[in-house]
Amino acid sequence: MTDDPAGRATAASAKPGPIETDGREEPRESEPPREAMQLAAAKREDLAPQRRGRGLAVVAILLGVVLLGAVGVAVWLFLQLEQANARLERQSDLIDEQHDLIEKKEAFGAAVAGIQESIEPLQGLPFASMVPWDRYQEIAETGYSSRWDAEAMDAAILVAQRAAQEMQALQSAAALEAATNASGTAWEATLDQLGRGYVATRIDDAAVTCDLVTALGCVFEAEPLVVHLNAASQSDPSMTDWIRQGVAYHEFAHVLQFTNPGATRPVLEAFDGNAETMADCYALTFLDGWTLEHEVWTSPYEGWDVNVGYGYVCDETERRLIRDWAGGLGVAMRTLSPTGSGSS
Ligand SMILES: [Zn+2]
């Protein structure tokens, strides 16, 4: 302790008591102890960060949830968009395919109409079987059954187009055949006129082709529009063009028999099933002056008796029957139907 000039003790820390200021003493309010204050402050300082931390965590969780939700919604929307795009693409593809199929269907319809048109010029021709109706009808039905298959439709269109082209080519060939006589024979001239170019004349070794040594000619059922004639008879002095013409009529009757089996059957019965006497009757009916027996003179004193045919001269009733038969023959027109219900 020291004495100041006023003689007052200044060692305030020496003992508690009123603080002297300006010579006066002021009473002091009681204060919490310094340690307690420090503890409380420390507690306050501890509690404030904890509250802030919890709040941040909640906010973070909420943000996370919101973010996850947003991502989820975005993914869902993306997937929906993808599915919608895929659906649109599929629909677009389907529309293209259907458009393609519609075009093929129209092309096929035109090809079948082409077949029908190619048959029109054959009306009136006496060769009914010349038009393969069953095959054409099958083509028309194939197109219908393939209408949902683009590749099959392409194939069906080609088949139909080729069928029409073949029929047109047949007619062009017939027109050429009718206009020319390549062999320069009475046979071909007669057959071109009777068959309008659709019947081919083949002058070959009939003895082999027809399997008959004495045959002047023949026709095969499997190849009904081809007449084979005996080449040897071309130079035979007992043969004349008149006889060759009659032989051509006889063979043409076989062409008619084979190309019109349905119409021929009842008439053939009237000839006791003999196709040869029926063919002879055809020649006797339609070739004026024709007979089955001929005298061929090579000089005023020499000649041959030539018998052509099968020895039976048909009567007037039979000739009328032959006329009716021949007049009723021909290509019967039908309408090709895609579903098989063709009409005639
Ligand atoms: Zn015959």
Image: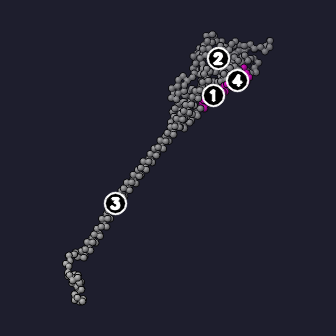
Q: Which of the 4 quarters of the picture holds residue 205? A: top right
Q: Nearer the viewer, mark 4 or mark 2?
A: 4
Residue 140 belongs to magenta span: no
Q: Which of the 4 quarters of the picture holds residue 331? A: top right
What is the distance, in whole Å, between disc 3 and disc 4 at their CAs?
105 Å
Considering every residue shown, the one lying at the far right of the view is 300
Is residue 218 shown to the viewer in this render? no
Residue 179, which numbered label? 4
Percent x, y for residue 41?
A: 27, 72
Label 1 neighbourhood size at 10 Å, few (<14), some (14-19), many (20+)? some
Asked if disc 3 and disc 4 are in contact, CB closer than 8 Å, the reply is no
Q: Nearer the viewer, mark 1 or mark 2?
A: 1
Q: Residue at x 61, y 16 (%)?
A: 327
- Residue where numbered disc 3 is placed: 59
- Residue where numbered disc 1 is placed: 168
- Residue where numbered disc 2 is placed: 279
